[in-house]
Image (spheres, rainbow, N blue to C red):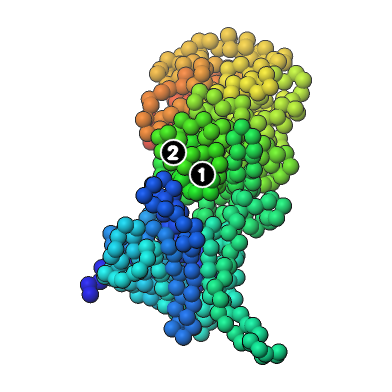
Amino acid sequence: MEKKPFQAESKRLLEMMINSIYTQREIFLRELISNASDAIDKIYYKALTDSNLTFDKDSYFIKVTADKAKRTLTIRDTGIGMTKEELESNLGVIAKSGSLAFKKENESKDGHDIIGQFGVGFYSAFMVADEVTVVSRALGETQAYRWHSTGADGYTIEPAEKDEVGTEITLQIKPNGEEDNYDEFLEEYRLKAIIKKYSDFIRYPIKMDVTASRKKEDSEDEYESYTEEQRVNSMVPIWRKNKSELKTEDYEQFYAEKHYGFDKPLKHLHLSVDGAVSYNAILFIPENMPFDYYSKEFEKGLELYANGVLIMNKCADLLPDHFSFVKGMVDSESLSLNISREMLQHDRQLKLIAKNIANKIKSQLQSMLKDEREKYETFYKAFGRQLKFGVYNEYGMNKDVLQDLLLFHSSKEKKLVSLDEYVSRMPEEQKYIYYATGPSIERIDKLPQTEVVADKGYEILYFTDDIDEFAIKILTSYKEKEFKSVSSGDLGIDADANEKTDDETGKENEDLFEQMKTLLAGKVKSVKASKRLKSHPVCLSAQGDLSIEMEKVLKMMPSGQDVQAEKVLEINVNHPVFVSLKDAFEKDKEKLGLYTALLYNQALLIEGLPLQDPVEFTNDICKIMV
Ligand code: ADP
Ligand code: MG
């Protein structure tokens, strides 16, 4: 029979499975049972919405059978089955192409760790088996097909016989190696324990033939062993269980089983709501950012069940964008089963649930911020950016919901602080909430522009994320305190005697500044004596709404917006350099040109802006050296 090759990505994944030294091989059973359960879900859902099909609850189950003599383990389900084409496309091609990209990135890390970190699916069977056979008959078909593979070199598909609709997967369990024990996957007690651990809440019975012993008939002390079929799982879905019965580990198992993330959840929320709308939900706040989170590929959404039946894998309408990191599921009796996707969007019940969920997530985050600061900061480092996008998006529609969840690095505290913490510490005479923007905390620490505000003893919030300033412009104020960039024109800091003379110096030097402005034509709006510089000779600031940081961000956008902040070159008239500048102005116009160019370029460098002509700049430096 002709062997077909696996698609390249599938082959790579398969090879990883075959050679895996992963210690938690037992998860293969979770994967296969979860697929079986999905397949029954599909037929269940079909039966409920298609009057030609009847659904007899008792005839739907999963059966796990071990045969020690043959070293085979079989997982049979009465689900929807697969056609020949489906066998080909579902088992020959890896669907989750993203997951492989993720693995590639992390390949340098310990190989075995990665397997546990994401949903490996069907191929995980090859961690314990050297030969896998799938016999499947799809709903509505009489012909069944057998898919068979002994590893990465390919697979075969041929017609087969099967009496009932459904799928039967047979694993030829690997022989024991020097260090690896595969026998355990043929042991009844081990299999039962694995099913209990990972698949207890599966809604369909998972059956096994187990050996029991009983007294022989007509005998007082003689026993005989016999086999009986038993259900191994409790079948109550975790979301229908009582919260008090559940431990954090149970939620973590559920999170892993559902492939919600590769990490452990930071926090879970179990909601049982009765009222205008009734629903159960289990929501998770992940600890780590999914590898594709800030990419177009990322799809937000929660699993949606109508009265226990899965009707949608990722219902996006259940989550606002700013909470798109939340994973989990919702089950509601109030939803109609045969509702179409299009109708769902307008469903009043669904909208109520979504609103309710958003509120719960918000209060959960708020209490985390209040009571579990460290955890919250872990969360914020992964997803804080999304909250800031949330403030900015939709013209600030959600800013009131989100502003209390924001954190920024503080110049004084040297750690993340909330806006509320900042405002509650403000001295009475301080008018504004000050912030400084830059690429990193270290860079902002050294920004000349922060000097005056810092000298006043005021706290400064550091904006290191490109979205920060945009978000804050939407907020404009917090608790009636306006936000103010340390680079903005009026800092609202009372002028002391010293600064008045600065103003006068400005007047005195009007001609000099005018001349410098002419020299820098088209580059700066004006040149002036600085009120904010203490020890540095020069800096740039912006007048008007657009800051220099914002100009940088907008220029980097794919749309490549060509915007210019209105830049002002500020000169520290108390700096020794200013004496030389004045001297040049009076005696040597060529030198003035040189100094002006140098100062301007220095200011650009401090701001992290590119020099228009770096060669000229270095030549200029040489000129003053010789
Ligand atoms: P996933 O479950 O995440 O889609 P898997 O690798 O576990 O990925 O399975 C791939 C696909 O193979 C499934 O999406 C499903 O279409 C099909 N499949 C696997 N097992 C079964 C089964 N027991 N019955 C029907 N279809 C199955
Ligand atoms: Mg699967």
Quarter of the render that holds ligand 1: bottom left
Q: Which of the two residues, 385 or 143, is positioned nearer the viewer here?
A: 143
Could you tell me the amino acid type at mark 2? Ile
Q: Secondary structure at mark 1?
A: strand
Q: Residue at x 54, y 24 (%)?
A: 397
Q: Kindly state the secondary structure of the residue where label 2 is placed.
A: loop
Residue 623, x across and y down, in percent: 43, 32
Residue 339 is marked as 2
Up/down of 367 relative to 58, above or below: above
Q: Position of residue 231 (x, y in %)?
A: 57, 67
Would you call the spot at circle 2 few (<14 residues within 10 Å), some (14-19), or many (20 or more)? some
Name the residue at the front extreme: 218
Could you tell me residue 552's position as x and y percent? 45, 30
Indicate which disc, 2 or 1, sits on the residue closer to the N terminus. 1
Which residue position holds label 1? Answer: 306
Q: Name the residue rendered at 54%, 59% in the picture.
A: 202
Q: Residue at position x 53%, y 65% from top?
A: 206
Q: Quadrant of the N terminus?
A: bottom left
Assess mark 1: CB under 8 A from ligand 1? no
Residue 296 seen by the camera:
yes
- With 384 as the anchor, is 80 left or right in this view? left
- Along the line of sight, which residue is nearer the eye, 291 or 472? 291
Task: Give the CA distance from mark 2 to mark 1.
Answer: 10 Å
Q: Quadrant of residue 396?
A: top right
Closer-to-camera residue (47/446):
47
Which residue is at a point 32% across and 62% down the rendered structure image?
A: 87
**Residue 201 position within the rendered picture, expressed as x and y whole percent measured from the top left:** 58, 58
Look at the numbered discs 2 and 1 and tell me whether their residues touch, using CB distance below 8 Å.
Answer: yes
Occupied quadrant, residue 99: bottom left
Q: Is residue 455 above or below residue 49?
A: above
Q: Single out the residue that lies furthest toward the right.
A: 428
Tag 1: residue type? Answer: Ala
